[in-house]
Image (cartoon, helix red, strand yellow):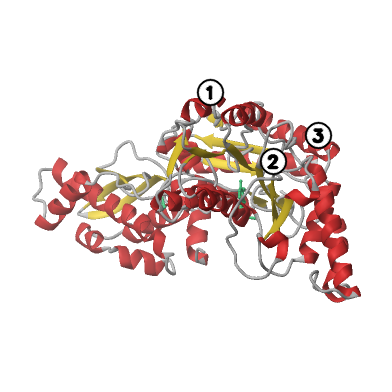
């Protein structure tokens, strides 16, 4: 084995692309104005801010005025959920069991504050059945929040079908699109979306930058009080360099790269499913993010395989119980009906821009080797 | 997160394997996260002559299993029973607090193997060991709340 380093954790975060870094650089020490200032320095910053807004909004088929910048996916989700709930005062929210903790935790808080929340189940692939959404809508339902693509297993939901229902029933529709933005089509008009959370660090932009699309006319309550930034909805001097980077990242993302990654991902899944005994693919076989793969290996534990691969330079992620502080397996895998012991040997490999075919082949052989090594130590493997 | 010694034992575990003609076998499961360890001993003149293990678990579980077998080999049964969780952890240069429970797995496995040996040979079982044996058998999976850092 060579000294290769293969980063296969792009669902966690991505490197900042060269073009993105270049687009950000002027806004640190050269065009450093405050976008709220009236002078030329301020106007430079304001221009960058508004150009960025336009570029990103376009990717969602939204109007620039409908996009608000935040500090990332977590803040966007919190603002969407709490902002709508607070504005309505009371009511019922529908979400699902496999949402990211940046959705589930605010929902739990809202429950404590008197709102009711329905957590819809998913099928074995992690798919939400739109008819379940329809059945769950009540007279007092104020919001449906279903994530576009899951961060662990990559399953993509049918937003259009859910959007039809929410429109018919007159409830607001939010999606956490942090994982899917620029990978899967998001069209706020076609999908009837009222709110969309996106962030920058999953698409080769800087960390700590995100946005929330809020359809024109939808009222939300601000969660950060202070200055009059972002139409009075999000106080705080805008992170102009970060936002410029976010816009550049959105601009350079494209179908061609998605298709390239998809081919590599297909190769990875095929080789592992055929080349390793007793392994299962978690998530949907087709309706999944182009860069996501997630496996469960029988008879071994995820943290062990992760650390062994790390020693070989291959960086992945696991949702096994042993890797969490609570020693509970992932809520996502459990929601798909997997038993705790099946979640044990889970391994997520998420691909990206810098991965080559050679990288993937190296990772495949590393996985084969280390799975075999760990099974040799395992009491559940007698071959 | 792990010490050099833990990583070393994790990457190159000692005494891995099974023992068809073992004199005592300990099979334990970690009540916290559901991991499994099997430990086999060969006893001669009340001394652990040979020892083997197999573990399904995290790096800490594998490393402590390996370390336990290393420390137990050659000891008398009484000396082996004295092996404490603390001793294992210290000899590995420490473990992160959330991983301390993994080291219990290995210590319990060894105790169970010795208990099995004594029981099979109809030998008196020390009260303390019998109590521990009952406790290990009774322990069931506990569940806590979920707190992965989602990414
Ligand atoms: C689906 C999803 N939502 C929200 C977040 C949180 O975003 P951020 O890290 O920008 O706060 C992430 C990533 O961690 C994510 O994958
Ligand atoms: S064996 Fe599960 S955390 Fe160590």
Residue at 41% from the left image edge and 53% from the top image edge: A113
Q: From the top left corner, tell me how far across and down residue A362 is, in percent.
A: 72, 43
Q: Nearer the viewer, mark 1 or mark 2?
A: 1
Is the CB of mark 3 within 8 Å of ligand 1?
no
Question: Is residue A300 visible to the viewer in this orientation of the structure?
Answer: no
Badge 1 and badge 2 both on one subunit: yes
Label of residue A131 in the image: 1
Is label 2 on the same chain as label 3? yes
Residue matched to label 2 = A180
Q: Report which residue position mark 3 lands on.
A: A259
Chain of residue at mark 3: A
Q: Is residue A44 above or below residue A309?
A: below
Question: Which mark sits nearer the N-terminus, 2 or 3?
Answer: 2
Is label 2 in a helix, a strand or a loop?
loop
- The tag earlier along the polypeptide, 1 or 2, is 1
Instruction: Say whether mark 3 and mark 1 are on the same chain.
Output: yes
Label 2 – label 3 distance at C-alpha: 14 Å
């Amino acid at each position: 084995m060579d000294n290769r380093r293969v980063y296969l954790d792009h669902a966690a975060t991505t490197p900042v692309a060269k073009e993105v870094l270049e687009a950000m650089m002027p806004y640190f020490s050269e065009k450093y104005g405050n976008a709220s200032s009236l002078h030329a320095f301020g106007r430079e910053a304001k221009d960058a801010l508004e150009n960025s807004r336009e570029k990103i909004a376009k990717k969602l088929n939204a109007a620039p005025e409908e996009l608000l910048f935040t500090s990332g996916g977590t803040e966007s989700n919190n603002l969407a959920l709490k902002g709508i709930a607070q504005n309505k005062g009371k009511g019922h929210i529908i979400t699902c069991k496999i949402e990211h903790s940046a959705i589930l935790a605010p929902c739990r808080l809202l429950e404590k504050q008197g709102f009711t929340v329905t957590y819809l189940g998913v099928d074995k692939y992690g798919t939400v059945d739109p008819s379940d959404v329809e059945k769950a809508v009540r007279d007092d339902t104020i919001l449906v929040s279903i994530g576009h693509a899951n961060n662990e297993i990559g399953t993509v939901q049918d937003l259009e079908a859910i959007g039809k229902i929410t429109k018919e029933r007159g409830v607001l529709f939010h999606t956490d699109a942090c994982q899917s933005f620029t990978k899967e089509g998001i069209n706020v008009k076609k999908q009837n979306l009222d709110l969309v959370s996106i962030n920058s660090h999953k698409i080769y932009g800087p960390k700590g930058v995100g946005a929330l699309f809020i359809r024109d006319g939808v009222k939300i309550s601000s969660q950060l009080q202070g200055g009059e930034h972002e139409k009075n909805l999000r106080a705080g001097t805008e992170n102009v360099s970060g936002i410029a980077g976010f816009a550049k990242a959105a601009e350079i993302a494209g179908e061609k790269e998605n298709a390239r990654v998809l081919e590599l991902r297909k190769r990875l899944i095929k080789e592992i499913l055929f080349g390793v005994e007793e392994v299962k693919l978690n998530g949907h076989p087709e309706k999944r993010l182009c860069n996501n793969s997630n496996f469960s290996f029988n008879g071994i534990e995820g943290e062990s395989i992760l650390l062994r691969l790390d020693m070989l330079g291959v960086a992945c992620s696991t949702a096994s119980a042993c890797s969490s502080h609570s020693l509970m397996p992932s809520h996502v895998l459990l929601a798909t009906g997997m038993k705790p012991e099946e979640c044990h040997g889970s391994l997520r490999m998420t691909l990206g821009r810098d991965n080559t075919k050679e990288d993937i082949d190296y990772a495949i052989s590393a996985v084969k080797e280390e799975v075999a090594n760990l099974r040799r130590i395992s009491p559940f493997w007698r071959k | 997160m792990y010490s050099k010694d833990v990583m070393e034992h994790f990457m190159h575990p000692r005494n891995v394997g099974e023992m068809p003609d073992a004199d005592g076998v300990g099979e334990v499961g970690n009540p916290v996260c559901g991991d499994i360890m099997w430990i086999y001993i060969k006893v001669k003149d009340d001394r652990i002559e040979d020892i083997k293990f197999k573990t399904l678990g995290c790096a800490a579980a594998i490393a402590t299993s390996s370390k336990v077998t290393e420390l137990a080999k050659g000891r008398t049964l009484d000396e082996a029973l004295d092996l404490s969780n603390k001793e294992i952890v210290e000899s590995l240069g420490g473990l992160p607090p959330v991983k301390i429970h993994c080291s219990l797995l290995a210590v319990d496995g060894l105790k169970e193997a010795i208990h099995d040996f004594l029981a099979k040979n109809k030998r008196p079982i020390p009260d303390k060991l019998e109590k521990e044996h009952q406790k290990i058998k009774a322990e069931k999976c506990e569940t806590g709340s979920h707190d992965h850092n989602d990414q």
